[in-house]
Amino acid sequence: MKEKLKNLPYILVYIVGVILLLLAAVFYRQPLLSVLFILMIVMPFLSVYTTIKVIPRIEVNIIPEYREYELPCEVRLIVTVNNPTFLPLLNCRLTYRLENMYYPDGRDRELLFPAEAHSNKKIYIPIKVEMAGMLRLKLMGLRIWEPLHMYTGYVVKSDIYDIPVMPVSNTPKNIRLNKSESMEEDAVWASDGELTMDLRQIRDYMPGDRLKDIHWLIAAKSDDLPVKEYERAKQLYYLLLPEPTEGNLQDTLSTFYGLAGALLDKGEIFRVAVYRDFEGIVDLITVEDRDPLKQAMYELYREHPAEETAAYEKYRELYPESTGLIRVRGREITEG
Amino acid sequence: MTIGIHPEEKREATELTSYGLCVGEPYTEGERGRAYLCLVRGLLVFLATFGTIGGLTASFGLSFNPVTVGIGLLLISVTVAFTYYNKVTFYMGYILMFMVFLVLYVVAYIQINSGFQAFLNEIYKAYSDFFILPSTRETTEYIIDRAITVPAAMLFTGAGFAILLNISISAYMDLFSTFLLTFLPMQLAFYIDIIPPIPYLVMLITVYITVEVLSRSGRFRLPYRYRRGQQYQTMRGKRFVRHEYLASARGMLQMAAGAMLISAVLMIVLSSAFNGRFTTRFVSNKVKDSTDRYVEALAQGGIASLFNRYQATGGISHGRLGGISSVAPDYETDIIVRTIPVVSAEKSTRINSIYLKAYTGAWYENNQFSPILHGTGGELLGSIPADDYIPVGANYMDSGKTAYFKMWLMNTDADNTYDYRPYYTLYSSSGRSEKASGISQNVRRYAEDSLDALFGEKEDRDELTEWVNEKSEEGDNNSFYELIYTPYAESAYYEPNPTITEEYEAYVYDNYLGISDELKEVVGLVATEAGLDSISVSPSDISLTGISMKDHGEYMAKQQTRLKIAATLKQFFIDEYSYSMLPGTTPMGRDTIEYFLTELKRGYCVHFAASSALILRSVGIPTRYIEGYVINPTDMIEGEAMYGESSDWIYVYGDDGIIASGSDKVAVVDAEIPDANAHAWIEIYIDGYGWIPYEMTPPSDDEDIQYNGFADFFAGLFSRTMRGTDNNDTDVTGGDIGVSSGILGFNNSRLSNVLGSMDFLLLPLLIVTSVIIGIIVLYHLIRHLAFITRIKRLERAEDYNELLLIRYRSLLKTMRKKGVIDITYPTVSDVCEKLSGLTENEDRASVLEKIISKAAYAKGQITYEEYMAALDIIKCIFTS
């Protein structure tokens, strides 16, 4: 309704023009006045009709340029405008919202552009980014005015694009960290001294086996001394718990990203505990290379910063016996 | 410390801190720059300029080479448009243009001037033919060869037009100013039924459409002050950030091309529809007639003729005649009178008009009838000459009975200099000096002697004051007074006035026969033409004049001749002249009466009264010019009526004494007299009797329309009276009205006039609408046929993949239209997922997905069975 009201002044001005022309044509009965009057009568119908027919054929989309973004960087949005028809629709308005999910803006952004006839053009929107996070691009709709500004066509657009922007890598120096000993309730020590969960077989005791690997339940019922042998023999993981808060958000992200990068550079496989404040859970993501790290970052970006110790407390509540947790808070890296 | 930080940088820093991002200015790579934009604007300026200049020149039959002039104007237009390229060209461009303009004018002054003169000569000729003017203006062409002078003038004028149009198009994209700049000059042709060649009209209409559309789109703006490369304008509000594209040169060009196509089609269609339907010559309405007067005066007298004019409102004009082009009363009440209606002496049911005399003109000179007597050394004698003798004892209703009436009069808005006196006022209570109130001393004495006993004690001051206060908005500021008068009426019977002395008659003959030397000849010629010299009345013909006097005989016959001459002159005016409230102006340097009598031959009361006074003087009849108000019978009828005591308002006595008693009731009327009732007439002197008022203004023509208000003004505009007798345009005015009246049953009604006035537009509108609808229907028909043909062709070629994909696209389109799917680029899976919710069987959607995926991505063709199966599912979806 509000959009339709915007056309009202144009319609009123047009009607006044038509009336004046009619009066002039009737009083003076001149051909040019009469032609203009007829033109003004016919034009709105013709214009609205052709616009209604043309609007479904107009293709307008806005997408982020596909590449990896790491601060400092400039994100580029690409608006593609394709008007295969003969009608130059000069007044198109694309409404979208673009905001870092950590710092919601709340403002609608509008791009007014022409859809020239038989054209397929690209409009680039540069975005200077200085904060890491998930940039969310949400299309709200496309409005197209017919040339006389009397009718507004509306095309629903509800596509959503997320653009992750990695923080500046703040690599810690000269820091010694321990791997985590326990992370899950049913995790047990494997024969090679590493934590695992998958039991491969139960076999007889062999010299060198750890006492905790002996299957005491069976041993108690029999004379044998069976030992649990696990499927995969893995190393102990570093377990990182980034604890972003309102105050240390960017620093936490930078430090975590730098630490994670450094671990990957060393060939370490680690796990990231992502605290989901809303659900009240902690997800564990195993990171072997850059892609899972990005995944972990995305998961972090989707969460709002929690209270200062909320993530740690929740983790402790879920894994009370776990040891070797690496907490990342601001620029600090501590073991807890 | 940040000193002098740019606001934009500050804003960017704030946004980056607050939101972590800042959206920069959008851009399009490879976009053509502002040079392209200036070029397109230049093209529009050219179309407007060439359409106007070329169209006008071609309209008046002046030959020129359109290619040469067109190229010249194109170069000028584009150059002018490039002034908006950047700041330097903007500021320097106008200075340079002015210099070039000046140099060109100096160098080619004679050629350009001669071209203008050639153009003017053709215009004068055409207008003279159109308006059938008595004379044609002509200017001197220094160079006869129009092949040189006309293009030179066209280019020079075109440059001026291009500069102005460049401002309205390049800077503002404003239709109104563009329209005025092009349409008004084109009126030179259109106004006199000359239609310029179609291509020029197409150019103009193209510009109108393009400018209107562009101004409404806003995609034309790229002012010189914007920095180079800037494509968008950014606006920020609390709830929005808007980037608005400034100018789409390509879109402008496309729009102009489209507009030209539409204009061309429109003109081709309408040229046949309008053929022969436009003849403005025979169109007449208040607006057109008024414009015609100005145009005619302009064509005949040049621009100077437009300046020595003023438009008179209602009210008296103090004898001023010169320069009045039209009278436009405001219909405000000037005077309110309370009196009893005066009925005709001949027929008691007819109410007579009452003339309220105010201004007396004695000497005519310099377009003014002044109250100053000729030869008195400029002594102002007030509103009337010294002794204003009037006839007394005029009878009422029947000979032998004289009536005295009372009138209460309030001046609400009339000129307060004068008293307004009905004929013949014997007494006024206005308290003014005798001269100012218009009652001479001896008349007052005569009245007092005769009437004091009857009316002196009957004045009811309280009632008068109350009445005035009720009517007056301004309270005490208005003047009101009581008058005693004996009504004048034609066909009345008069007695000799005993108070007239020989000295007074000598004075009358000395002063009221004067005519200025300049006018003597003209006035004499008109008197001769009217045949006034040869008129005589024998004693037995005295009834011819309508006024009877005692002492019939040869002497009185001579006096009656005066009235007969006046009647003859009036008839002459009726036959040869016409009444008009919009007579047009008098050219500078011409005398109003001379111009009226010899050329104009149309006018209103002032023209007729003033001319009559001089013409009658020329044949030896003492005459004077009078202004005042006339109370029409309709004013009396429409006034508020009440009962009054007859003894308060009328007294009649005859030879046998008083015949009206004070006990009877009479109808008393409050009449409101508007300024439109202001009037001019003459007084003729009858020896021994005094001054007799005489109406010289002929009645208005039947064709003239009486306008009595704002609503009637518009009604008058729509009424289609015809001008001229050679009505050869019955198609436009007669036949079609008859049809519409017949169908709607509004014979002679205002509505039929309104509808009838627009009939000439209806058929062309119908034709254009039909053509457009036809084109649209044809377009869709062709598209549908093409679609069917393609399907058939694919079926023959057994290309089931393409056939299915066509169906799939249709399905997708329908889903979008119905709002089932709103993803911009949906995959087949997306579509089928949505469809599974619509179909009763989810398996069918998955079957469809498989077949469509196979058709779209697999190397081979789908089978006919698969195609038909998919088609069945799609049809099923369509029907659901």
Image (tube, rainbow, N blue to C red):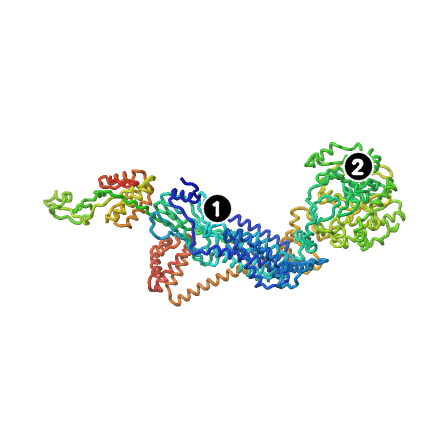
Q: Chain of mark 1?
A: A
Judge left or right: residue A14 versus residue B472: left
Residue at the disc numbered 2: B434
Residue bearing mark 1 = A2
In the image, taking residue A333 as reference, residue B466 lies left or right, namely: right
Give residue B797's position: percent from left, percent from top.
Answer: 39, 67
Dot 1: what SS? helix
Q: Is residue A333 visible?
A: yes
Q: Nearer the viewer, residue A222 or B382?
A: B382
Q: Quadrant of the C terminus of chain A?
A: top left
Q: Is residue B587 left or right of residue B494?
A: left
Q: Secondary structure at mark 2?
A: helix
Q: Position of residue A231 (x, y in %)?
A: 18, 49
The answer, for residue B349, to whether it is visible in the render is no
A201 over B784 or under it: above or below: above
The crowd level at tag 2 (other Cα within 10 Å; few <14, some 14-19, many 20+) is some
**In this rendering, would A223 be left or right of B786?**
left
Please name the amino acid that badge 2 sits on: Glu
- Identify the subunit bearing mark 2: B
Instruction: Return the x and y of residue A178 as percentages of the image width and height.
Output: 22, 42
Q: Give the CA separation, mark 1 to mark 2.
A: 74 Å
**Pair 1/2: label in front:** 2
| Displayed quadrant of residue A25 | bottom right
Which quadrant of the structure image shows residue A130?
top left
Task: Give percent across and percent down for residue B676.
Answer: 71, 45
- How packed mark 1 is, by other alpha carbons closer than 10 Å (few <14, some 14-19, many 20 or more), is few
Image height check: is B86 above or below B495?
below
Q: Amino acid at mark 1?
A: Lys
